[in-house]
Image (cartoon, rainbow, N blue to C red):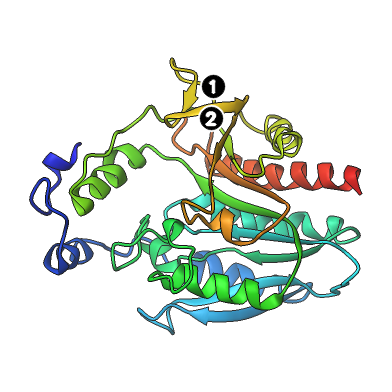
Amino acid sequence: MSYEEYAIGVPGQPWGDAEKAQWLNNQQVKREYKVEVLAKLEDLKGSFEVLQYGALPYDQERYPLFAIKTKAWNDDKPSILITGGVHGYETSGVQGAIRFVKSKAKAYEEHFNFVVLPCLSPWGYETINRWDPKAIDPNRSFYPNSPAPEAALAMDYVQGLQLDLLAHFDLHETTDTDNSEFRPALSARDGIHQDVWDIPDGFYGVGDSNNPAPEFQKAVIDSVEKVTHIAPADADGKLIGTPMEQRGIINYDKRKLFLCGGFSGAKYVTTTEVYPDSPKVDDENCILAQVAAITGGLDYLIKQM
């Protein structure tokens, strides 16, 4: 599908309020944040601090926002930030963050403090959507006075902690709907043609072009490869239209693009990209790949300490 074929708007003309309202009216709740996320956080309260840091203004009762923190916080230990669900439709990012806390975090608390924001975009999670209700992409909105409350509330909370973060793991997916729905919608919304690309079959990571940390990124890939397959380059030697820095890794200027991975100022930053539509994986494998990405990065950091 191209933007010329998208059901909303006039090709070549950016959407106004009427088109955005039409798009919002088409969205439907497909799963429950309360059941799939909030209930799992209840189970963590005995071992971790589970703190509400805000609520989305669309429905504050339905969409409270939570952080999970190390209970026995030690200022002498380096701190790690994990974010999931910036794009609500990227399921394993949310579930992978929760699974890491449940299954692995305690084993690493000897070395690190953790702050985990498992689901920044609960409305997007429920509607299986990339955007928020205002047709804004939260993962292009991490800047001061952000119009996306998903980004603004997360930034305010994390920056308010005044931590010198050692690492930031931002958990994402690349799906077939990136080409079939979300990029055509972006083209239609902005009235600008957006190229589509081959969706990589497998896991890949995105480093920061201003601080690529190649050995750290390699450690993430090596760990994930024990769980699932790594995406090969396309015929042009690229992944999603971007030259590869090394096997399974591309780099973006995360601050310039206002990505979640760019706001934290952490020394080591990686964005994970799981491919849930591959015939080689299932939901559980995708969750385990997210966990492996985190543990691979943490194991590397421990060796540097």
Residue located beneath label 2 in the image: 202
Q: Secondary structure at mark 2?
A: loop
Q: Is residue 62 visible?
A: yes
Instruction: Give the spatial CA distance, label 2 vs label 1.
Output: 7 Å
Residue 120 point in image, percent of width and height: 51, 66
**Residue 4 left/right relative to 174:** left
**Quarter assignment of residue 164:** bottom right
Residue type at tag 2? Gly
Residue located beneath label 1 in the image: 232
Tell me whether circle 2 and circle 1 mark residues in contact (CB < 8 Å). yes
Q: Residue furthest left?
A: 10
Q: Is residue 33 visible?
A: no
Closer to us: 215 or 30: 215
Q: Which mark is residue 101?
A: none
**Quarter assignment of residue 58:** bottom left
Q: Secondary structure at mark 1?
A: loop
56 to 26, vertically: above or below: below
Within-10-Å neighbours for mark 1: few <14, some 14–19, many 20+: some
Residue 153 point in image, percent of width and height: 51, 75
Residue 130 point in image, percent of width and height: 37, 55
**Residue 150 left/right relative to 1:** right
Q: Earlier in the sequence, mark 2 or mark 1?
A: 2
Closer to us: 67 or 20: 20
265 to 5, vertically: above or below: below
Within-10-Å neighbours for mark 2: few <14, some 14–19, many 20+: many
Quadrant occupied by the N terminus: top left
Name the residue located 16 percent from the left edge and 55 percent from the top edge.
Answer: 14
Name the residue located 89 percent from the left edge and 44 percent from the top edge.
Answer: 304
44 to 107, vertically: above or below: below
Front tag of 2 and 1: 1
Closer to us: 281 or 225: 225
Q: Residue furthest bottom?
A: 61
